[in-house]
């Protein structure tokens, strides 16, 4: 902050861990055989994750891309 208490910059971490609060049914992926599904995380965002991720799991997300990284 500056002398007037104004924020000059904010640094966002590269990764965050958030809880899965809602999970949908998995959809068959492309020819690679990956099975992905959409989940809602505690901040309200929806992201694609592997089929094994379930409601209540804590997952690691890359804030630069918004993509699932791993279960935490």
Image (cartoon, rainbow, N blue to C red):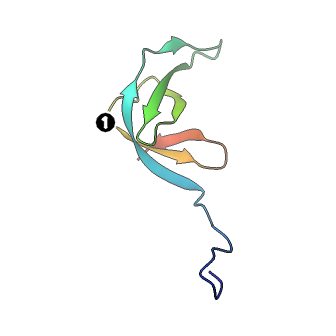
**Quadrant of the image containing the N terminus:** bottom right
Whole-percent x and y of residue 23? 40, 24
Residue drawn where x is 64% and y is 13% of the image: 30
Q: Does residue 5 appear left or right of residue 20 in this picture?
A: right
How many numbered circles does the render carry? 1
Q: Nearer the viewer, residue 71 or 32?
A: 71
Mark 1, residue position:
56
Q: Nearer the viewer, residue 37 or 1?
A: 1
Whole-percent x and y of residue 22? 37, 28
Q: Secondary structure at mark 1?
A: loop
Judge whether 40 appears above or below 17 on screen: above
Residue drawn where x is 58% and y is 15% of the image: 33
Residue drawn where x is 46% and y is 37% of the image: 44
The quadrant in which residue 48 appears is top right
Crowd rating for badge 1 (residues with CA inside 10 Å; few <14, some 14–19, many 20+): some
Q: Does residue 33 appear left or right of residue 18 in this picture?
A: right
Residue drawn where x is 40% and y is 26% of the image: 52
Judge whether 27 appears above or below 50 on screen: above
Judge whether 35 appears above or below 22 on screen: above
Whole-percent x and y of residue 65? 66, 43
């Amino acid at each position: 902050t500056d002398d007037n208490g104004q924020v000059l910059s904010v640094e966002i971490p590269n990764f965050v861990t958030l809880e899965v609060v809602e999970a949908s049914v998995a959809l068959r992926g492309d020819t690679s055989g990956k099975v992905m599904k959409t989940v809602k995380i505690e901040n309200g965002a929806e992201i694609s994750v592997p089929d094994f991720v379930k409601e209540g799991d804590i997952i690691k997300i890359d804030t630069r891309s918004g993509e699932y990284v791993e279960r935490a």
